[in-house]
Image: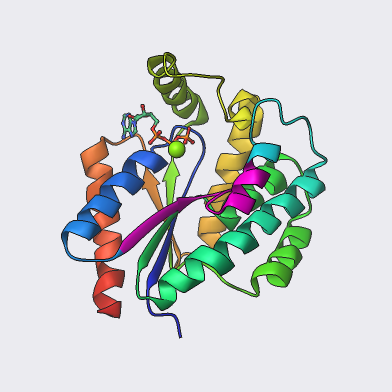
């Protein structure tokens, strides 16, 4: 039986996932929990190599289904080498994106058959799912503007924008927002949609409420 807690954050670009993950990890650590944070695709050297193949700006254009296969390969690495061992060790694992992003981006966004994605998920992960998924929901235009502002502020530091998904058009982003909302409607026990237009403190308060109920249940 799983002993830790697996929490994922989902939503489009600039919805505040990283901001909220950092806050939650800090709050849980301060209350004495063992926490690890990780991201998708990535989290192991092998999975980071796949990340470079699919997410970098010069990554080319993959056939959507081929991209799904790469994501599940990276996910299997992360789950088997990092996430499951940490959960067995009673840790709280917080992951920046997981399978729901594949459903939203490649399924709703790029039109890969949703049943195919489900079958691949069953094949590779054997039903492994997060205990809690926080979906940060915002109008895509506002989310993309936030991302742009952040990238503009960071521009000294480097580099090209890594995330080529941010380059895709607004219609695509509207479809993936709908994808996340459909996922949440299908799995209301696991998924919690939070209005990401609220201020950072209001959102982190709601996240803390959701997580504390589940943490209480496992203590
Ligand atoms: N609730 C909020 N209100 C206003 N600005 C916010 C809020 N949450 C985050 N931001 C700001 O918006 C930008 C994007 O936030 P963040 O990087 O956390 O989003 P993200 O979902 O991780 O984005 P990405 O998908 O690009 O990784 C940052 O500059 C952050 O400071
Ligand atoms: Mg982020």
In the image: residue 143, left or right of residue 21: right
- Residue 74 part of the magenta segment: no
Please report the residue visible at 56 percent of the width from the left and 20 percent of the height from the top.
160
Quarter of image, ligand 1: top left
Q: Which residue is at the far front?
A: 45
Res. 178 image quadrant: top right
- Residue nearest the viewer, comparing 28 with 167: 28
Against 61, is 63 above or below? Answer: below
Give the number of callouts.
0
Could you say where residue 72 lies in the image, as x and y percent from the top left?
68, 57
Res. 129 image quadrant: bottom right
Locate the C terminus and report the quarter of the image it occupies.
bottom left
Could you say where residue 175 lies in the image, as x and y percent from the top left?
63, 38
In the image: residue 84, left or right of residue 37: right
Against 206, is 55 above or below? Answer: above
Against 197, is 217 above or below? Answer: below
Please report the residue visible at 21 percent of the width from the left and 41 percent of the height from the top.
201
Against 88, is 132 above or below? Answer: above
Give the colour scheme of this rendering.
rainbow
In the image: residue 20, left or right of residue 58: left
Q: Which segment is the magenta one?
A: 35-51
Q: Is residue 26 visible?
A: yes
Q: Which residue is at the far left?
A: 31
Could you say where residue 197 lies in the image, as x and y percent from the top left?
34, 34
Could you say where residue 32 lies in the image, as x and y percent from the top left?
18, 65
Please report the residue visible at 28 percent of the width from the left and 44 percent of the height from the top.
203
Please report the residue visible at 37 percent of the width from the left and 58 percent of the height from the top.
36
Q: Is residue 187 visible?
A: no
- Residue nearest the viewer, comparing 16 with 75: 75
- Residue nearest the viewer, comparing 50 with 117: 50
């Amino acid at each position: 039986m799983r002993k830790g807690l697996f929490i994922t954050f989902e939503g489009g670009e600039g919805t505040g996932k990283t901001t909220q993950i950092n806050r939650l990890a800090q709050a849980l650590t301060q209350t004495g929990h063992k926490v690890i944070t990780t991201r998708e695709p990535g989290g192991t050297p092998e999975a980071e190599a796949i990340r470079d193949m699919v997410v970098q700006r010069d990554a080319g254009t993959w056939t959507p289904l081929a991209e799904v296969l790469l994501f599940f390969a990276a996910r299997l690495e992360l789950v088997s080498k990092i996430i499951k061992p940490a959960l067995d060790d009673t840790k709280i694992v917080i992951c920046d994106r997981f399978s729901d992003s594949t459903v939203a981006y490649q399924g709703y966004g790029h039109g890969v058959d949703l049943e195919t994605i489900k079958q691949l998920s069953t094949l590779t992960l054997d039903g492994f799912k997060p205990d809690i998924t926080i979906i940060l929901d915002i109008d895509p235009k506002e989310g993309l503007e936030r991302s742009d502002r952040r990238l503009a502020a960071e521009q000294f530091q480097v580099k090209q924008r890594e995330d080529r998904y941010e380059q895709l058009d607004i219609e695509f982003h509207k479809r993936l927002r709908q994808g996340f909302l459909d996922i949440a409607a299908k799995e209301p026990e696991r998924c919690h949609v939070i209005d990401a237009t609220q201020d950072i403190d209001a959102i982190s308060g709601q996240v803390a409420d959701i997580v504390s109920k589940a943490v209480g249940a496992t203590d």
